[in-house]
Amino acid sequence: MSSGLCQGRVVIVTGAGRGIGRAHALAFAAEGAQVVVNDVGVALDGSATAEGPAADVVAEIEALGGKAVANTDDVADFAGAQRLISSALEHFGRLDVLVNNAGVVRDRMLVNLAEDEWDAVIRVHLKGHFATLRHAAAHWRAEAKAGRKPSARVINTSSGAGLLGSVGQGNYVAAKAGIAGLTVVAAEELARYGVTVNAIAPSARTRMTEEVFAEMMAAPEDGFDVMAPENVSPLVVWLGSEESAEVTGRVFEVEGGQVSLAQGWRHGPAEDKGARWEPAELGPVVARLLERAPEPEPVYGAR
């Protein structure tokens, strides 16, 4: 049952043709939002296909009585990202929420990772987040300076891999860690314009995770599909609503029915000599620091 939480708000969701992005688009529409469904329509590794998933999701939304428009621009192309932001303004007259979700994977162990595989993943995930955020932020800043301060929201998509690391995904981990860092900086920079910026680190069944979660694909015995992409969207919709105005610069992990707040890098134990250390002095210092610090969370896939 809809509560109308986002009634009248205009939302862009990137990578919204399938998986988590599609679930976000449908969930926002169900709560009264008008949605720009962005998806360039590529294969999992970023190669071209003849599919048009963005238009399919728009048709789903319209069939349920909602309003949506398709956009097929490449979010990692700077001009394409600007066209995406303009699409919301041209079709719906405003922009309230940007959900950055688009991504690709090209998993390899570092010793086998090719340069183009590194570049492709960094480009779509990290540059794709920056480019759309940059153009949306410029619009919202102009609105604020014109006396029309927005109540705008950005929800980025990091990953548990980006927060903790994941063996065999060095390119993906670097991109997702970068997104988490970008989120906290953007939250600080854009607060003055009425914009909050948060991120999620979701665990769900998508094209990118189907091999990782292969053992969890079986139909749930209790009727609750923990890995369903739709489990992630309620938090994203709430973060996109006006109710979330006091929450910014945060990263949330979402899996099944569990929502948790991720704790990032923090200043830890320290020793100050008051002068420059000699290299030979630092062995015992480091040992004492490690003794006083908690053990780090294990990297996904670590032995």
Image: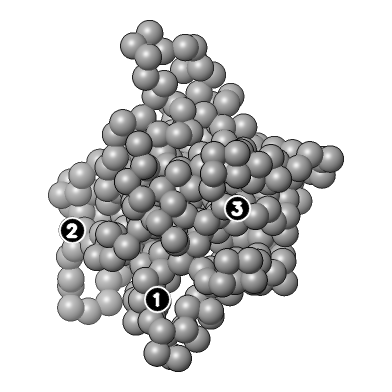
| Residue 16 % position (x, y) | 60, 46
Residue 150: assigned label: 1
| Residue 171 % position (x, y) | 60, 48
| Mark toward the start of the polypeptide (3 vs 2) | 3
Q: In the rendered structure, which amino acid carries the disc numbered 3?
A: Ala
- Give yes or no for contact between labels 3 and 2 (Cβ–Cβ under 8 Å): no
Mark 2–mark 1 distance (CA, rounded to whole Å): 41 Å
Residue 27: assigned label: none
Q: Could you tell me which residue is drawn at 27 percent across and 42 percent down?
A: 260
Q: Quadrant of residue 225?
A: top left
Q: Which residue is mark 2?
A: 269
Q: Could you tell me which residue is drawn at 72 percent across and 66 percent down?
A: 80
Q: Which residue is mark 3?
A: 68
| Mark toward the start of the polypeptide (1 vs 3) | 3
Q: Is 205 situated above or below 135? A: above
Q: Could you tell me which residue is drawn at 18 percent across and 58 percent down?
A: 269
134 or 50: nearer the eye?
50
Q: In the rendered structure, which amino acid carries the disc numbered 2?
A: Pro
* Residue farthest to the bottom, as pictured: 146
| Residue 261 % position (x, y) | 27, 48
Q: Could you tell me which residue is drawn at 69 percent across and 56 percent down?
A: 71
Q: Is residue 112 visible?
A: no
| Residue 22 % position (x, y) | 56, 41
Q: Is 151 situated above or below 107? A: below
Number of callouts = 3
- Secondary structure of residue under mark 2: loop
* Residue farthest to the front, as pictured: 65
- Of marks 3 and 2, the one in the foreground: 3
Q: Is residue 80 visible?
A: yes
**Does 104 sit left or right of 67 as displayed?**
right
